[in-house]
Amino acid sequence: MEILLHKLTYERVRGRLDALGLDLQVTCVDADGAYSRNGVGVEPEDVHPEVFWLSLDFFDTRQVSDSFDMVLRPGTVKWMQTFNAGLDRGRYREVLDAGVRLTNSSAQAVAISEYVMAQVLNLLHPFEAQQQAQSERAWVATPFSELSQSTWLTIGFGPIGQAVAARARSFGAHILAVRRGADSLGLADEVGRLDDLPAFLPRADVIVLACALNDATRHVANTEFFKHVKQDAILLNVARGGLVDDAALLACLDAGRLKKAVLDVSAPEPPDPDSPYWSHPRVRLTAHTSWFGDGTIPRGDDLFFDNLVRYVRGEPLDMEVGPSHFG
């Protein structure tokens, strides 16, 4: 069985692949788009992988589009593992339409959930006032809002939403979840669907956008959405910029309804130089970096190896997606 992966990925996991004892032919592609096998260059037309691992090592390389061309070549790839959690970018719908099995990634969930917790705690605790008091040698109390008294609304309850809920729940927060299914895996106190947002939003102190971007969720955070938000709620978008209607969010911020909008994503990325997000006093903007924890790559490796064994054994693949993912 031939596997196609990035050269850097292979250099990192070669020992793990060898230890599996499988009959594998490994083909690598480097940052310049050149293919090789056992250190010897091969032509693209001689590469016929059954399995393609689009790992994070492809993130800053130029040949992702060429790799999709290979995946979509008839009769070649049967299973593709990607580093992406969201599949709205890239040609993933074409991959499914071509009959290729597709698995996305949960490796980012831990890092993103820690980012969310760090941002919320930073906004609820008066660190600046405490530092100011220290600098003035003033022994004064600085009250803060407890997470134990808060209600969180997570829109999207896949691995990222679940990881956020687990961490907020450990602080004693009340968890509302919006998802397609009814099962909250014991992580949410209440579960609803998008239609339930008008009932959930007025109760939520923290709102986390963690859902896929598709036809049903595009601009889900719109004017009607912001009519229902609780005064001084915190909004965090760690999914896709297209979930938010920018004009509606800015109007809500300018009206003083939201305490802060924490935006790790935008549309486009980066925002235009003249975007109000750069300087808005109620916006905290980061460069799509919430996934960038030092455990994300190792978890992505573990996911691929677990799925590779499952694939060889003919077992169900973890994180396999179907057409419903796209709306």
Image (cartoon, rainbow, N blue to C red):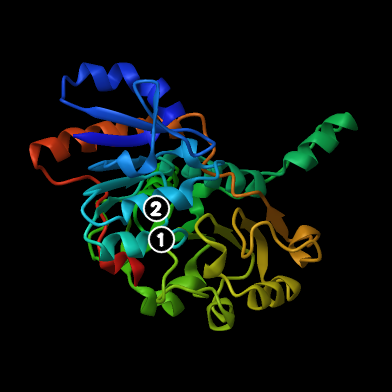
Res 326 quadrant in image: bottom left
Q: Which residue is mark 2?
A: 68
User: Which residue does the numbered mark 1 point to in the structure image?
Assistant: 91
The image position of residue 133, as x and y in percent, is: 84, 35
Look at label 1 and name its amino acid. Answer: Arg
Res 144 visible: no
- Residue plotted at (21% across, 27% down): 24
Asked if the residues shown at circle 2 and circle 1 are in contact, with their CB atoms under 8 angstroms apart, the answer is: yes
Q: Residue furthest right?
A: 136
Q: Position of residue 317 (x, y in %)?
A: 19, 45
Where is the C terminus found, in terms of image quarters? bottom left
Say left or right for 206 vs 153: right
Q: Residue at x 76, y 66 (%)?
A: 275
Q: Is 293 located above or below residue 67 in the figure?
A: above
Between 265 and 193, the one lying in front of the other is 265
Residue 221 in sight in this render: yes
Q: Is residue 126 above or below residue 248?
A: above
263 left or right, relative to 179: right
Residue 47 coordinates in the image, percent (x, y): 31, 40
User: SS for tag 1?
Assistant: loop
The kind of residue on which mark 2 rests is Phe
In front of the other: 203 or 162: 162
